């Protein structure tokens, strides 16, 4: 394994980036991954856990655990679908809606810290390259 390879560098970046996200979100009572669930619910409240799995490209147990933790901390409610009791829907609570501006503020700080040493053209290129890789 070469420490200068793209994969090694990218994995190191991803690990450090995730740690930094966790630190910033911890300041407002969240774990880094939970912001993705909340962000999806801010776009479309009342999604089923299966819809969140698909939207976030995560495993069902991961989404289940995230939703349960968010429910324990009062940011969401998990309820059975009134038309199909096999389906569990996730709804934002008042706290879940009210924390959005704090999360967006921390996300902005996260972006600034992460990419402060890049020029605007470099940020645009990095964004384009990441999208291209993720399309695969």
Image (cartoon, rainbow, N blue to C red):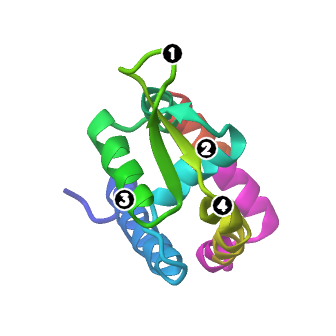
Tell me if mark 2 has few (under 14), some (14-19) or many (20+) residues whose alpha carbon lies within 10 angstroms of its own. some
> Residue at label 2?
40
* Separation of residues labelled 3 and 1 (CA atoms): 25 Å
Which of discs 3 and 4 lies nearer the camera? The answer is 4
The reply to whether discs 2 and 4 touch (Cβ–Cβ < 8 Å) is: no
User: Can residue 103 be found in the magenta stretch?
Assistant: no
Q: Residue furthest right?
A: 120
Q: Which residue is at the front of the view, 17 or 34? A: 34
- Relative image position of residue 28 (x, y in whole percent): 55, 79
* Separation of residues labelled 3 and 2 (CA atoms): 16 Å
Quarter of the image holding residue 121? bottom right
Q: Which residue is at the front of the view, 132 or 40? A: 40
- Relative image position of residue 91 (x, y in whole percent): 57, 44
Quadrant location of the N terminus in the rendered image = bottom left
Identify the disc placed on residue 41: none
**Nearer-N-terminus badge (4/1):** 1
> Residue at label 1?
83
**Nearer-N-terminus badge (2/4):** 2
> Residue at label 4?
94
**Nearer-N-terminus badge (3/4):** 3
The reply to whether discs 3 and 4 touch (Cβ–Cβ < 8 Å) is: no
Location of residue 30 with respect to 91 vertically, above or below: below
Identify the disc placed on residue 69: 3
Secondary structure beneath label 2: helix
**Nearer-N-terminus badge (2/1):** 2
**Nearer-N-terminus badge (3/1):** 3
Tell me if mark 4 has few (under 14), some (14-19) or many (20+) residues whose alpha carbon lies within 10 angstroms of its own. few
Secondary structure beneath label 4: helix
Residue in the picture at 41% in, 61% down: 14
């Amino acid at each position: 394994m070469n420490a200068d390879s793209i994969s090694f560098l990218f994995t190191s970046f991803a690990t450090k980036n995730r740690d930094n996200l966790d630190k910033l979100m911890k300041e407002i009572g969240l774990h880094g991954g939970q912001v993705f669930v909340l962000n999806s619910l801010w776009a479309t409240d009342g999604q089923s856990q299966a819809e969140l799995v698909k939207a976030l490209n995560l495993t069902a147990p991961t989404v289940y655990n995230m939703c349960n933790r968010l429910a324990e901390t009062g940011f969401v409610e998990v309820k059975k679908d009134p038309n199909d009791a096999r389906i569990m829907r996730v709804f934002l609570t008042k706290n879940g809606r009210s924390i959005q501006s704090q999360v967006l503020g921390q996300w902005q700080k996260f972006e600034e810290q992460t990419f402060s040493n890049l020029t605007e053209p470099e940020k645009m290129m990095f964004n384009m390259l990441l999208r291209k890789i993720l399309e695969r």
